Image (spheres, helix red, strand yellow):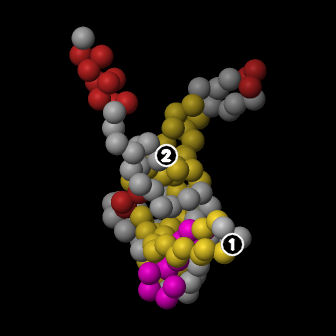
Amino acid sequence: MATMTSRKQRQEAPKVRVEIRKNDIVRVIAGRDKGKEGRVLSVDRRKGRLLVEHVMMVKRHTRPNPSRQIKGGIAEREGPIAVSSVMIVCPACGPVRIAHKVDATGGKARRTRVCRKCGAPLDKK
């Protein structure tokens, strides 16, 4: 009976609003890797966590599998980090918060992410 409750609670977890996207450059502002910068590899919006290149490295013990050409041993890979522990890096002024600028060109409005300090666009076109 306990598994039913925990599974139900897990599914009803509220989605975290994530302003960071894949391939953004971010700086870690909290945790054991504070100060490191890296590129975002993947974003999990449901859990509010992301994988950042060379941040939160964990050791993974792998068993060899000759049929898939997998060598055994200890492999290092990135572990997930909370979205609240990182800030996006503006090319002009460093780690910043994100603002949105609405461009109403024609009939369709487009929201673009901009730097809160200098107003530089953070979206790559």
Q: 74 above or below 85? A: above
Q: Which of the two residues, 120 or 29, is positioned nearer the viewer here? A: 120
Q: Which residue is mark 2?
A: 44
Write down the region rendered in magenta.
110-119
Say few, some or many: other residues with alpha carbon within 10 Å of mark 2 (under 14 / 14 to 19 / 20 or more): some
Measured from the top left, where is residue 47 in percent x and y? Answer: 41, 43
Measured from the top left, where is residue 113 in percent x and y? Answer: 54, 71
Q: Could you tell whether 12 is left or right of 119 in the image?
A: left
The answer to whether one can see residue 97 in this image is yes
Q: Which residue is mark 1?
A: 106
The answer to whether one can see residue 54 in this image is no
Secondary structure beneath label 1: loop
At x 62%, y 31%, the residue is: 72
Q: 105 above or below 51? A: below
**Image quadrant in which you'd find residue 86:** bottom left
Characterize the magenta stretch by its predominant secondary structure.
Answer: strand
Tell me the quadrant of the picture where the N terminus can be found.
top left
Q: Which of the two residues, 85 or 120, is positioned nearer the viewer here? A: 120
Q: Which of the two residues, 86 or 60, is positioned nearer the viewer here? A: 86
Measured from the top left, where is residue 111 in percent x and y? Answer: 56, 68
The amino acid type of the residue labelled 1 equals Gly
